[in-house]
Image: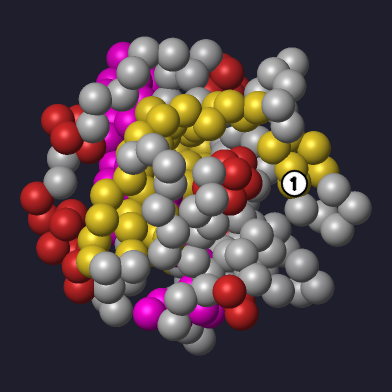
Amino acid sequence: MTPQFSIIDDNDLFVVVNKFHHVDFHTIDDVLGIVQLVKQHLNLSQLFPVHRLDKMTSGLIIMAKTKVVAAQFGQLFSDRQISKYYLALSDKKPKKKQGLIKGDMKKGRNGSYLLLKSNDNPAITQFFSYSLQPGLRVYVLKPHSGKTHQLRVAMKSIGAPILGDTRYYPTSHQASIIANNIGRLHAWQLSFCLLGHDYHYQVTPDWQDISALTNWLDVFDVTNDCTWPVL
């Protein structure tokens, strides 16, 4: 069987895994989702995911081992005390190299979401954009909310839909430079403080066909190279 995840940390409180792309979050039609796969692998009777990733999205997921710990993570997310950074690739250049994407989200009839101009309960995302090579850019995304399809819709809204995202960027429109069967959105870094202990996790996306990204990651520092405006 093709590997579907790797264990990044397994401690008494929680598990952190790197979910590979095209792995479902939930079990569907007897095909095990990531939570069940990890439970089975670690021989655990229960796991409580505290956030989720879309099927096309790879990267870091936290799963609590008890309901109490899950509730503590829930409070951290609610208070925006968990720092998350994502990487995305697009063949489009935004009007601005950095900025804020903010607006309410509404589900359309075809299952896709739309970003609205209203701000009653908005999705909030900050971004920085960098050129990797002609026709290819990497985006560092910092979400401040956890809406369904948030980052995918945010990227489309600035005219830079994510490569490999067939829902928001039809395959026929994408650059041939990237294999279209891989969604190029990755949960790259997670940082938080739980019960007085600081945790930081980082995992590089498995996009070996993009050598320019590997070279960029070798010298890039999200803390020092991005000046994130205070919201």
Measuring from the top left, give residue 190's x and y in whole percent: 36, 37
- Is residue 202 found inside the magenta-colored segment of the image? yes
Which sits in the foreground, 113 or 196?
113
Is 147 situated left or right of 94 in this image? right
Q: Residue at x 47, y 28 (%)?
A: 100
Q: Is residue 68 above or below residue 172?
A: above
Q: Is residue 81 above or below residue 16?
A: above
- Is residue 195 found inside the magenta-colored segment of the image? yes
Q: Residue at x 33, y 65 (%)?
A: 136
Q: Is residue 135 above or below residue 139?
A: below
Is 44 situated left or right of 141 in this image? right
Is 187 situated left or right of 213 in this image? right
Measuring from the top left, give residue 215's x and y in whole percent: 13, 63
Q: Which residue bears the numbered disc 1?
A: 113
Q: Amino acid at mark 1?
A: Tyr
Which image quarter: residue 170? bottom right
Q: Residues within 10 Å of mark 1 (few under 14, many from 20)?
A: many
Measuring from the top left, give residue 137's x and y in whole percent: 33, 58
Res. 199 visible in picture:
yes
Which sits in the foreground, 60 or 217?
217
Which image quarter: residue 105? top right
Farthest front residue?
95
Res. 13 visible in picture:
no
Q: Quadrant of the C terminus?
A: top left
Farthest right residue?
109
Q: Secondary structure at mark 1?
A: strand
Q: How is the image coloured?
A: secondary structure
Q: Residue at x 90, y 53 (%)?
A: 109
Q: Which residues are magenta?
A: 177-204
Measuring from the top left, give residue 44's x and y in whole percent: 55, 53
Q: How many marks?
A: 1
